[in-house]
Amino acid sequence: MKLAVLFGGSSNEHEVSVISACSIIKNLDKNKYDITPIYLDKKDDFYFWRKDINEIEPMEIGVLPTSLEKIEEPFLTLKNYDCVFLMIHGKNGEDGILASILEFLHIPYVGNKPAPSIITMDKIYTKDILECNHIKTSKYQSFMKYNDTYMYDGKSCSFDEVLKQILEKLSFPMFVKPANSGSSIGVGKANDLKELEKAIQEALRVDERILIEEMIVGRELECAILERGGKVEASLVGEVLASDDFYSFDAKYKNSESKTVIPANIDEEDSREIRDIAKKAFQILNLHGYSRIDFFLTSDHQVILNEINTIPGFTEISMYPKLWEATGVSYSNLLDSLIVENIKK
Ligand SMILES: Nc1ncnc2c1ncn2[C@@H]1O[C@H](COP(=O)(O)OP(=O)(O)O)[C@@H](O)[C@H]1O
Ligand SMILES: [Mg+2]
């Protein structure tokens, strides 16, 4: 099978995508797949990565590929492959944009379908849909900057009015997030009004749609979903022990003190509930193939869904492949399942 692995791209998770793709290429069975790594630079220009695929290893975060050859007609080129493996986190990749182009051109790919990807990438749409379907998430408010005004609760209003409403509805500490981002970029914690205003300004640099949540005091748990044999399966549950105040970008990728514990040391009943909710959320959002679903678990055993990642990190220290390994599916077999059983056409 001629397989193109697409990675990099214009999102703020470019560097993470590079390591995810290197890990995938390292773990793909070279006897089964004729692999071509295709790198998208930060302007989304396409390049062949002319490196011996047998020598590709995950690099340190921030190291980018060299020996590149520009592809002048990327989509004509992609038509030459049996399948494209999308490994681009965030904007233009995980959000379904690239998947829509591939669908239109009838190029088979591994990744979620466009519409569910666009919706799931947006933390506000996702929470609204989960809430309608009785899946518990943190208490939240949202607003957006629309031209020179702000839209809140169906009305156009001033920034001060938005702040006033948020303060009435939510208590500190709060988390402020751009609706569309990832890897904790633009995510801020606010303990008071001054920090809230600052966090909102930071988040507005990333997206005009802003989500504000009440802080959950609880453990951070993650569950991996994979569709196999037409069935939605959930992995064991893993725990993240962030080295920082919260699981920030640096805590995720730069601080070796951050740890993952697989399987998480939690009650059997909590684990079952997390896996059930993960599968339900996956189906509610009409996802297919794979996703990682992240939760909080409070000391009084409340399971609260935090977010869904449709192209989760795939580095060798990432939760998604590690959770499956612990559940009995090796990294290579996991990739086979994704490619053989979950190609979208
Ligand atoms: N409501 C919340 N309560 C407590 N911690 C939170 C909350 N929301 C986010 N966090 C912390 O911020 C991190 C990043 O937020 P998240 O929504 O997962 O964004 P991203 O998509 O960037 O990973 C989480 O892993 C967690 O540590
Ligand atoms: Mg997260």
Image (cartoon, rainbow, N blue to C red):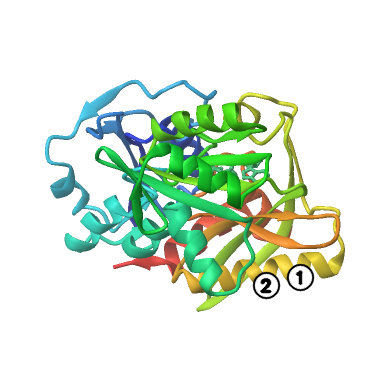
- The reply to whether the C-beta atoms of the residues labelled 1 and 2 are less than 8 Å apart is yes
For the N terminus, the quadrant is bottom left
Q: Residue at x 85, y 60 (%)?
A: 300
Q: Quadrant of residue 248?
A: top right
Q: Secondary structure at mark 1?
A: helix
Report x, y in % for residue 329.
65, 60
**Does residue 25 show up?**
no
Report x, y in % for residue 128.
48, 63
- In the depicted structure, whether residue 24 falls above or below residue 249: below
Q: Given the image, on which type of amino acid does mark 1 rest?
A: Arg
Q: Which residue is mark 1?
A: 272
- Near-viewer residue (155 or 71): 155
- Near-viewer residue (159 or 207): 159
For the C terminus, the quadrant is bottom left
Report x, y in % for residue 144.
37, 46
Q: CA distance from mark 1 to mark 2?
A: 6 Å
Q: Residues within 10 Å of mark 2 (few under 14, many from 20)?
A: some
Q: Residue at x 33, y 58 (%)?
A: 109
Q: Which residue is mark 2?
A: 276
- In the depicted structure, whether residue 230 falls above or below residue 41: below
